Amino acid sequence: MSDALVFHFDVDGENFTSAGQASTQVKKNLRQLGLPPDIIRRVSIAMYEGEINMVIHANGGTADVSVTEEYVEIVLKDQGPGIPNVEQAMQEGFSTATDSIRSLGFGAGMGLPNMKRYTDSMEIDTVIGVGTTITMRVNL
Amino acid sequence: MKVSELLSHGFEAVSLPDGDREIVGVYIGDLLSWVMGRAEMDNAWITIMTNVNVIAVASLADTSCVILAEGVELPEDIVQTAQEKGINVLSSNQPTYETAVQLAGLVS
């Protein structure tokens, strides 16, 4: 089996309006690789939600996407405050976003649920005061 | 029906880089994550949100077009972004409900 293709991105925590640049680039890369539109859509949305979360809650972070013959894996890593109650954060509608974030149309409490919805597996590794790493896979 | 065909039904083109794209179904929503969770590929997406994240969501969720209802206007720099990203944006002066009703008669 050939080696995985890996893409690395830094997600800028300061710039809310540029959020989505990494996922847009991944979408382009996956298209060039000829992956099916449905797979590309699932990966793009899950990654965008993760990017937005990192911008809203963690002052940015990094995103690494690897593509193998079996799956696309997205690893999102930040040095943010951590998630105190993952079970609660996974509930649709639960959000700690501010009013200014909500006025942009975010903060509906659908970010993590959407990430789970669109991927085949999702693991959340979070430590309060240290950061959060989320690993998602979409099977090919 | 094609996105560009809406122009002959009272919708105005704000950005139309891919007018031949086919519309399949309609989704209405302003909460972006809700839209990403529920809208389907090729839907026409009716919203009143006009920030740049709308363009990112339309691109990533792969909707056929964004339809701005209630006569809301997209800022010029965001029109530019929509064109660069190949995102179709139309506008309607009708309220959201009337816009949806009109689309219901047009889109399968």
Image (cartoon, rainbow, N blue to C red):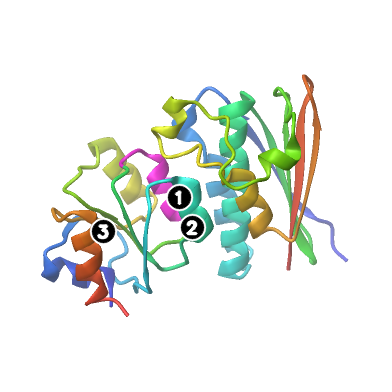
Image position of B73 with respect to B67: above or below = above
Q: Is residue A97 left or right of residue B8?
A: right
Q: Chain of mark 1?
A: B
Q: Position of residue B59 (x, y in %)?
A: 44, 54
Q: Mark 3 or 1 closer to N-term? A: 3
Mark 1 and mark 2 in contact (Cβ < 8 Å)?
yes
Q: Is residue A87 left or right of residue B14?
A: right
Q: Are marks 3 and 1 on the same chain?
A: yes
The residue pinned by badge 2 equals B61
- Residue B53 within the segment the image draws in magenta: yes
The amino acid type found where label 3 is placed reads Leu
Crowd rating for badge 2 (residues with CA inside 10 Å; few <14, some 14–19, many 20+): many
Asked whether A95 or B33 is in front, the reply is A95
Q: Which mark is residue B16?
A: 3
Q: Position of residue A28 (x, y in %)?
A: 55, 55
- Is residue A133 something one can see in this rendering? yes
Secondary structure, mark 3, is: loop
Q: Is residue A80 left or right of residue B18?
A: right
The residue pinned by badge 1 equals B57
Residue at 40% x, 35% y is A104
> Nearer the observer, disc 3 or disc 2?
2
